[in-house]
Amino acid sequence: MINTTENTLYQIMQFVQEQHRQGNPLTSDIINPFLNRMLTVRMVPKDSYITTVLTPIKKVYYVMSGSFSMIRSSVDGKNTIRIQKAPTFLGVDFTVLSLTGYFADNLALEDCLVLNIDQKYFLESMKQNGEMCYEVLYSICSKFFQTSFRYDHTLFYDPCTKLMIYIMDHWITNHRQQTKYTIAVPNTRIADEIGVSIRTYYRAVAKLKTDHFISIAAGNICVTYEQIQQIRSYLQNAKAVTALPAFLENSTLM
């Protein structure tokens, strides 16, 4: 448990990370005894917004449980979507750079327990605790790496390759030892996540189905363990893929 006589933000972060490692659920009741006037907690229900583009950023947000979509939209209706899982920070960049706007809608994909942190208190905690500073830097670098990979993903990969990488990632993250797995995600969301139009997405789906990499059930992509092995082999051998995600090289599929 957190030492209540030294109730620092870093101790809360350590506690949250340990609960994740142990697979223990987090609730506001567990966190409440360790809060102070600079720290408040709220539960953001599924399909509600943690922040929006209209939210003045006056806090740093530490999403302690759940997952959410970071959605950026253009004036002509195009979207980019990136999925983030807890624990992670929002608003660190805006706090460090003294910015007040925000450029993404952060939509909870499941219930999210969020720690609201006073900006000044956050910065002072960073300056006073080198270990905390490292943890926050690690989180920022991880997001930067994901953004860099997504940019490369858009430039280098064709739609079928993008979709296969998405399928592989989804299988590794969610299949839970099933021999057959259905990706129950709306087609429009998958298209947004891989950065293609819905028409291009459907063409990629049709091509992968024709080539027997996937099947379709009730409008959703389905894959078997054997198909996943075929997808992995294709991605590793494809000359077009110059920088595969680490999970394709290092993960155990079953």
Image: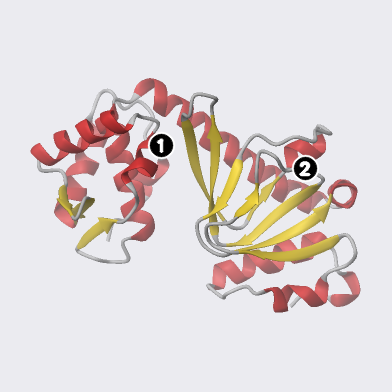
- Taking the spot 23% from the left edge, 35% from the top edge, the residue there is 202
Q: Which residue is mark 2?
A: 57
Question: 88 above or below 76?
Answer: below
Seen from the viewer's position, the closer of residues 195 and 171 is 195
**What is the quadrant of the C terminus in the image?**
bottom left
- Taking the spot 77% from the left edge, 42% from the top edge, the residue there is 57
- In this rendering, does residue 249 appear at all? no
Callout 2, which amino acid? Ile
Within 10 Å of disc 1 (Cα), the crowding (few <14, some 14-19, many 20+) is some
Residue at disc 2, secondary structure = loop
Q: Residue furthest front?
A: 76
Colouring chosen for the image of the structure: secondary structure
Distance from label 2 to label 1 (Cα)? 26 Å
Residue at disc 1, secondary structure = helix
Residue 199 sits in which quadrant? top left
Q: Which is nearer the N-term, disc 2 or disc 1? A: 2
